Image (tube, rainbow, N blue to C red):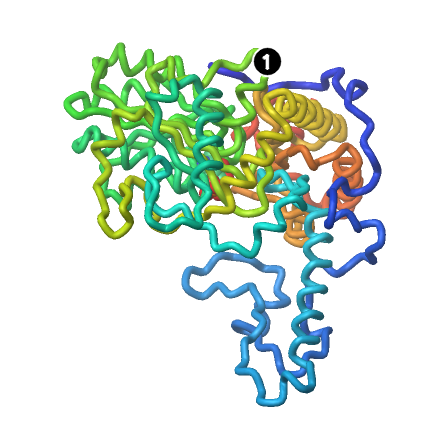
Amino acid sequence: MVGGIMNGATDLCDKVETLPKELDLKGTMNCSDKLAQLPNEFDPMEIAPPFTLEGNGVAEDLTSRNRDIVLGRNVHTISYAIKEPEADDDVTGEREAYMASVLSRYRTSLIERTKHHLGYPYNLDFDYGALSQLQHFSINNLGDPFIESNYGVHSRQFEVGVLDWFARLWELEKNEYWGYITNCGTEGNLHGILVGREVFPDGILYASKESHYSVFKAGRMYRMECVKVGTLVSGEIDCADFERKLLMNSEKPAIVNVNIGTTVKGAVDDLDMVIETLNKSGFKGRFYIHCDGALFGLMMPFVKRAPKVTFKKHIDSVSVSGHKFVGCPMPCGVQITRLKHINVLSSNIEYLASRDATIMGSRNGHAPIFLWYTLNRKGYRGFQKEVQKCLRNAHYLKDRLLTAGISAMLNELSSTVVLERPKDEEFVRRWQLACEGNIAHVVVMPNVTIDKLDRFLEELMERRLRWYGNGEARAPCVAVDVGPENCRCSDHKN
Ligand SMILES: Cc1ncc(COP(=O)(O)O)c(C=O)c1O
């Protein structure tokens, strides 16, 4: 077992940094102190537009708090209608004024929503003011990062710089790796698993049941046989179950997705044990390992005591999201694989004068510059400090929850705090929590300060008094999700 769950209160609270009271966004976004509190959702109807704004669906969906998912029928959003310009618009300036008003209110609502965000693994603390000068360019890295296409408005020089940095982090020599900046962690998984399938066309895809849905999507897209492996309470892969399932399919090679931080519990699969299980089950030389490090792939190298994700071990590809821990305003990611694998996948495209080895065609040329900018500013040492701060603050949250009698769990190597699902949907939406069954989680990112956590805790405790105060309703039992020792329901609290 790699990490294990942290139980009980630790003495970390008093070591946690005191952080500024206000939202710590920088640059253009640092104006929260001037803002009045807004309603949770931005209502464009308040703006008095020069023409009617249309709802995008059934009226009651806009106000309903009930978010049961009904496939094909769910419409929870509003839309800002686009209408043909009137002949005299330029003269009256009404349309420009209307659009400016919508954008300004939207920006205000973004600041407010940023202030109350805790549930998704996005670092919302960044300042890319220096890059606004590049906004006017249509930068596109279509094709292979290492083979220049005929389209000259690209940022390959930044892309390759970023890829070199990650290859060094995961210990793969410059002349032995291939990679590219993807659109997101999902694309990294789609690519890694595709490379695995090309290396072993009849391979079976193995992934723990707590893997991100994109892994199973890849299996479906590529019509691969897919075997789900059980997990421990911590959320990491159960290698005993893995071995059983490997032995049932010993005639076909294995393509394995290893989680470097699962989505819901932040659990890290034990890479060494996965490799050992493959070897002892007779799969030596017949397996491909893709490491899904969407969030934690960049954090783990900076966690003391954490096992290493390194190409010195028998792994074949690693992917990470760029908008998560790094903090990039647009979704993006990094994918690194062994150079020797990529020839299987790629073909030359005359129209591009480049090679096609990526999933997408056109590729965001701005994203590599944002990544390059942050990596240069922070460097290994900067990331290390941020990781330490996230882990300390996550411990603080977990300890305070447990002390307050609220079920909570934190994996040792993670900053994802699992807690009982708050009873009402309004609270869940206000703090933008991600929920699954009876549990929710808070992902402590560099922008999540102690002050923010305190505000969240205060509100949660106050709401719980309303939900459970009179004893008629009971907090859910989450022992199966977090272990009985971390469950504070009436049956388990001690
Ligand atoms: C473990 C894991 N893998 C993959 C992804 C997908 O990443 P993205 O949202 O960047 O596509 C996520 C997203 O949260 C994740 O948690």
> In the depicted view, which residue is nearer to us: 202 or 47?
47
Residue in view at x 59 percent, y 36 percent: 373
Report x, y in % for residue 247.
Answer: 22, 19
**Residue 336 falls left or right of residue 342:** right
Residue type, label 1: Lys
Instruction: From the viewer's side, name the closer residue of 140 and 192.
Output: 140
Label 1 Cα neighbours within 10 Å, binned few <14 / some 14-19 / many ≥20: few
Hey, which quadrant is residue 54 in on the image? bottom right
Q: Is residue 411 visible?
A: yes
Question: Residue extending furthest bottom?
Answer: 87
In this rendering, position of residue 464 left or right of residue 249: right
- 458 or 300: nearer the viewer: 300
In which quadrant will I find the C terminus?
top right
Question: At 39% from the left edge and 42% from the top edge, which residue is drawn?
Answer: 187
Residue 436: image location, x then y, percent: 52, 42
Side of 61 relative to 50 (left or right): left
Q: To which residue does mark 1 refer?
A: 304
Residue 110 vertical placement versus 198 (above, below): below
Above or below, 148 relative to 138: above
Label 1 residue SS = loop
Q: Position of residue 300 (x, y in %)?
A: 54, 21
Residue 476 location in percent, x, y?
A: 61, 38
The residue lying at 46 percent from left, 42 percent from top is 155
